[in-house]
Image (cartoon, rainbow, N blue to C red):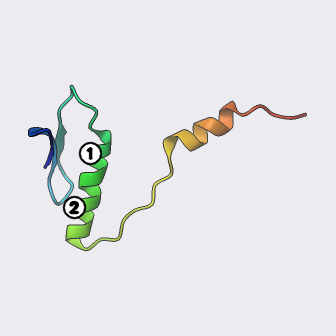
Amino acid sequence: MAEVGGELWAARQLDGRLAIADPFHPTADLLALLALLAGQLAGRPPRRRRHRFAARSRLLEPRLR
């Protein structure tokens, strides 16, 4: 579970099948941390993920001719 200021914002099962989050708060980072913690508790190595913005930023770069 992830609490912020004494309020429950997100929770995730240790096996990773179910996660819930408060839709009125920014919880994507909390869910990612909970997934990492669940993997550590299960003895799995962390997965490396590419940042989503990296691919988009290359599309926006001006091309030199």
Labels in figure, total: 2
Instruction: Determine whether, in the image, residue 57 is placed left or right of residue 43.
Output: right
Query: Disc 1 marks which amino acid?
Result: Leu
* Snapshot quadrant of residue 62: top right
Q: Is residue 43 above or below residue 34?
A: below
Residue closer to the observer: 33 or 43: 33
Residue occupying image coordinates x 53% and y 39%:
53
Residue occupying image coordinates x 14% and y 54%:
13
Q: Secondary structure at mark 1?
A: helix
Mark number displayed over residue 22 = none
Residue occupying image coordinates x 13% and y 38%:
5
Seen from this angle, which residue lies furthest top?
A: 24
Q: Position of residue 49 (x, y in %)?
A: 46, 55
Q: Position of residue 57 (x, y in %)?
A: 62, 36
Query: Disc 2 marks which amino acid?
Result: Ala
Residue matched to label 1: 30
Seen from this angle, which residue lies furthest front?
A: 5
Q: CA distance from mark 1 to mark 2?
A: 12 Å
Residue occupying image coordinates x 50% and y 47%:
51
Q: Is residue 43 above or below residue 31?
A: below
Seen from this angle, which residue lies furthest bottom?
A: 43
Circle 1 or circle 2, nearest the eye: 1
Mark number displayed over residue 38 = 2
Seen from this angle, which residue lies furthest right?
A: 65
Of mark 1 and mark 2, the one earlier in the sequence is: 1
Q: Position of residue 47 (x, y in %)?
A: 40, 62
- For label 2, the crowd category at 10 Å Cα-Cα, with few meaning under 14, some 14 to 19 and many 20 or more, is some
Image quarter of the C terminus = top right
- For label 1, the crowd category at 10 Å Cα-Cα, with few meaning under 14, some 14 to 19 and many 20 or more, is some
Q: Is residue 40 above or below residue 63?
A: below
Q: Secondary structure at mark 2?
A: helix
